[in-house]
Image (tube, helix red, strand yellow):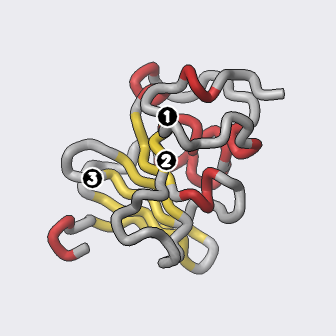
Amino acid sequence: MLGFDLISLPLVRPTLPRRASFWGACGPIGSHEMKHEPCLICPHVVSVQRPVRVLIHHHDGTWQAACGERDHAVDCGDFAILALSLVFERQADVRGLDQLPVEHIAQWSDGRWEVMPFDEGAA
């Protein structure tokens, strides 16, 4: 049983399954703002098919978490918007990235996270 109701989360996409085991029981993490910060999350991560392997903090302050594979809808229409704190709660190896600077990307490579500037125009 989930420790929260997915429908009560901010900005939940209506097509998201109500019982997504990915999110587990959620407790407090980080700042109050982090708990409610929206994050665009790939469907493979939401459905627990794959872990987060790319985390982006965009120039406008929004976040994106993806599995790093290229088999998504071109317009990212299959992504869900959920609370960013849930990404950090679910996957231990991304917890240290909660302070990722704006306009930066973190990519999993060779068993560790590599953080670098992210150029929106080049992406």
Q: Position of residue 74 (x, y in %)?
A: 37, 71
Say whether disc 3 or disc 1 marks the residue closer to the N-terminus.
1
How far separated are the C-alphas under marks 3 and 1? 20 Å
Question: In this view of the protein, which residue sits in the foreground, 108 or 25?
Answer: 25
Query: What kind of residue is marked 1?
Result: Val
8 displayed left or right of 5: left
Q: Residue most toward the left?
A: 121
Question: In this view of the protein, which residue sits in the foreground, 63 or 108?
Answer: 63
Q: Residue most toward the front?
A: 15
Question: Which mark, residue 12?
Answer: 1
| Res 44 quadrant in image | bottom right
Say whether disc 1 or disc 2 marks the residue closer to the N-terminus.
1
| Res 81 quadrant in image | top left
Question: Which mark, residue 84?
Answer: none
Query: What kind of residue is marked 2?
Result: Ala
Which residue sits at x=19%, y=76%? 122
Question: Which mark, residue 58?
Answer: 3
Instruction: For the N terminus, give its image quadrant.
Output: top right
Say whether disc 2 or disc 3 marks the residue closer to the N-terminus.
3
47 displayed left or right of 21: left
In the rendered image, which residue does mark 2 sit on?
A: 80
